[in-house]
Amino acid sequence: MADVNRGNRPLSPHLTIYRPQLTSMTSILTRITGNALLIASLLMVWWFLAAAISPEYFAVADWVLTSFLGDLILIGSVWALWYHLLAGVRHLIWDNALMLDIPTAEKLGWACVGGSFLLTLVTVFLV
Amino acid sequence: MISKLKYAFTHGSLSEAVHHALLMKASSIALLILMPLFIFIVGPMIGRPHDDVIAFFAKPFPAVVVALTFIVGFKHFSDGVQVLLEDYVHGTARKISILVMTCLSYAAMLIGLYAIIKIAL
């Protein structure tokens, strides 16, 4: 706590000298995807607001979302959402102290990556 | 050297952290159901004519799914971004950035709710 000697203790390895592992990369990706989803969320709120206000305003918002850039953001966000959802499930499993050993954790990491791309393909195909 | 009292003031009470973690968990489980519904309900309506969109979201089920997703989704975002800022931003900038992102989250939530209620009713 407050009066502990902080000067002469071993440090855990800093991120910059740590070999990247699947588990650490999939972990930081969860945070990146979750926060990046703000952009698509605000676009969706704007789309609904425009629809509520007038057909003319809706035409503008709908044009933006169906433009090339809009499509790119939405498809990217669909992938980010599936990834974040699968990674979240992984955390809910880990919270019960299950599947924490490294081989299983690595398999779960690959499942998140593979599953997110698969679900994105399914979404693009269906929607 | 900082006193134990000062340490407690700067880091806050840990019982708040438990509450925060449980909220994150509860909202994540709700979103596990809401987000796939949102994608497959709202996704096909993007790019459709204005009349179709209004008629579709005037129906109870799509309207309620959208409203619940806005409420739970932006609450989950607000709680999540708070942890991100607590990890990487320090001092006054941390306080201000958390305040700004919390305001943004609730503003987006309420604007979204206003829109879907106006369409649905």
Image (cartoon, helix red, strand yellow):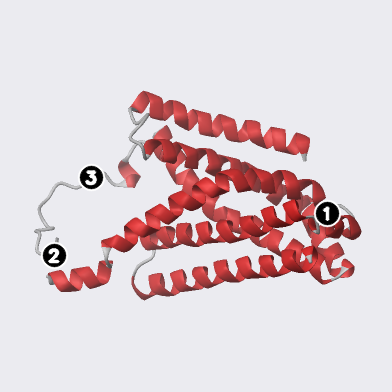
Which residue appears at 51% of the width and 68% of the height?
Answer: B101
Cα distance in 3D space between marks 2 and 1: 59 Å
Mark in the foreground, 2 or 3: 2
Residue on which disc 1 sits: B56
* Quadrant where the image shows the C terminus of chain B: bottom right
Cα distance in 3D space between marks 2 and 3: 20 Å
- Percent position (x, y) of residue A118? 64, 31
Mark in the foreground, 1 or 3: 1
Mark in the foreground, 2 or 1: 1
Q: Residue A44 occupies which quadrant of the picture?
A: bottom right
Report the amino acid beneath label 1: Phe
Q: Is A59 on the left or on the right of A79, as rendered? A: right
Chain on which label 2 sits: A
* Same-chain check, marks 1 and 3: no
Judging from the image, what secondary structure is the residue with disc 2 in? Answer: loop
What's the mark number on residue A2? 2
Of label 2 and label 3, which has the lower sequence position? 2
Which residue appears at 29% of the width and 61% of the height?
Answer: B15
Does residue A20 appear in the picture of this structure?
no
Which residue appears at 45% of the width and 36% of the height?
Answer: A90
Q: Is B89 on the left or on the right of A112, as rendered? A: left
Q: Residue B71 occupies which quadrant of the picture?
A: bottom right
Q: Mark 2 touching mark 3, by CB under 8 A?
A: no
What's the mark number on residue A12? 3
- The residue at the far top in this view is A103
Q: Residues within 10 Å of mark 2 (few under 14, many from 20)?
A: few
Q: Residues within 10 Å of mark 1 (few under 14, many from 20)?
A: some
